[in-house]
Image: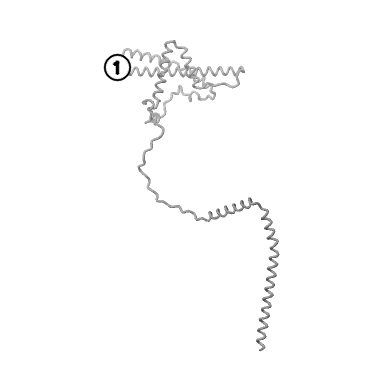
Amino acid sequence: MTPKKQDGSDADSDKLEGSEAASDGGSDDEELSDSSAPEDTAIDASLNQISFGALAKAQASLGLSSSSSSNNRRKPKIKKISPTAPPNTHPPFNPPSTPSPRKRTVVDATAISGPKARDPRFDSVVLSHGTSNPQALGNAQAAAAKNYSFLNDYRDAELSSLKQQLAKAKNPAEKEQLKRTIRSMTDKIRTFERKQREKEVAARHRRRERDLIREGKKSTPYFLKKGDVKKEVLKQRYEEMGAKERQKSIVRRRKKVAARERREMPDMRRTG
């Protein structure tokens, strides 16, 4: 009978311990609830002080961050690899937008003929040998032109001889050949005289500018352009001509300019 009493006492003791533990737990919960109560009231008070606009902005930012994070979590798209098509060996011809020029250089004659022969008597490299001053080079060129001025007399004599042969010739082919030769020599003489006139005009202008600077009337010289030199030469040439010769030269020059403009005009404008 004694063992039964001990079991009962043990059960009673267990009940007492459970009730004490429950009472302890309840007291702890009460303490926690008592301590968290002022914190909740403080949070509620702070939330009441926040405006609705600030709350809406915070909610919108949270929504954007959540949507961006969800977008970042999306799976990357897998690109579909299409089979490469073989290259088209016969594509259509696309003509260029700019029209092709009327004159086409099929064969470059200068590249085939090679370097041009130079006469050392009139070569600028030979004349400038040992002279670094441009004025000395100009003097050397003038001296060379003076030393070989007899070539001009030979050229004039040859031209007059060709004109006499043309007057006596009866064969049409020979006449045509003589005319072509005379025309070529006349053009060369005219070109040589024009270049000499241009040199004289440029030298005269340089002397005038040098004198003005020496007198103190100018501080910096003015150099003539090539177009200005050509205009001055043409003006002097017209002044030396007579009235009839000047009129013929003007008409000839106008025809030459008109022919050049007509030659350079596009086909569409000319035919239309």
Quadrant of the rendering where the N terminus is positioned: bottom right
Q: Residue at x 41, y 32 (%)?
A: 98
Residue lying furthest left: 171
Residue lying furthest bottom: 1
Judged left or right of residue 41, residue 77 is left
Quadrant of the rendering where the C terminus is positioned: top left
Instruction: Give the residue number, with chain letter if any, for mark 1.
Output: 172
Q: Position of residue 251 (x, y in %)?
A: 41, 15
Q: How many marks?
A: 1
Determine crowd level at label 1: few under 14, some 14-19, many 20+ residues with C-alpha closer than 10 A.
few
Taking depth in this image into account, of 65 and 252 the one nearest to the observer is 65
Q: Position of residue 167 (x, y in %)?
A: 33, 12
Residue 215 in which image quadrant? top right
Query: Where 53 falls versus 210 (above or below)?
Result: below
Amino acid type, label 1: Pro
Q: Position of residue 36 (x, y in %)?
A: 69, 63
Query: Where 140 falls versus 30 (above or below)?
Result: above
Image colouring? one colour
Taking depth in this image into account, of 176 and 19 the one nearest to the observer is 19
Taking depth in this image into account, of 201 and 18 the one nearest to the observer is 18
Q: Position of residue 27 (x, y in %)?
A: 70, 70
Secondary structure of the residue carrying numbered label 1: helix
Residue 171 in which image quadrant? top left
Query: Where 80 falls versus 266 (above or below)?
Result: below
Q: Residue at x 48, y 24 (%)?
A: 124
Q: Residue at x 67, y 58 (%)?
A: 44
Taking depth in this image into account, of 268 and 165 the one nearest to the observer is 268
Judged left or right of residue 53, residue 112 is left
Judged left or right of residue 38, residue 246 is left
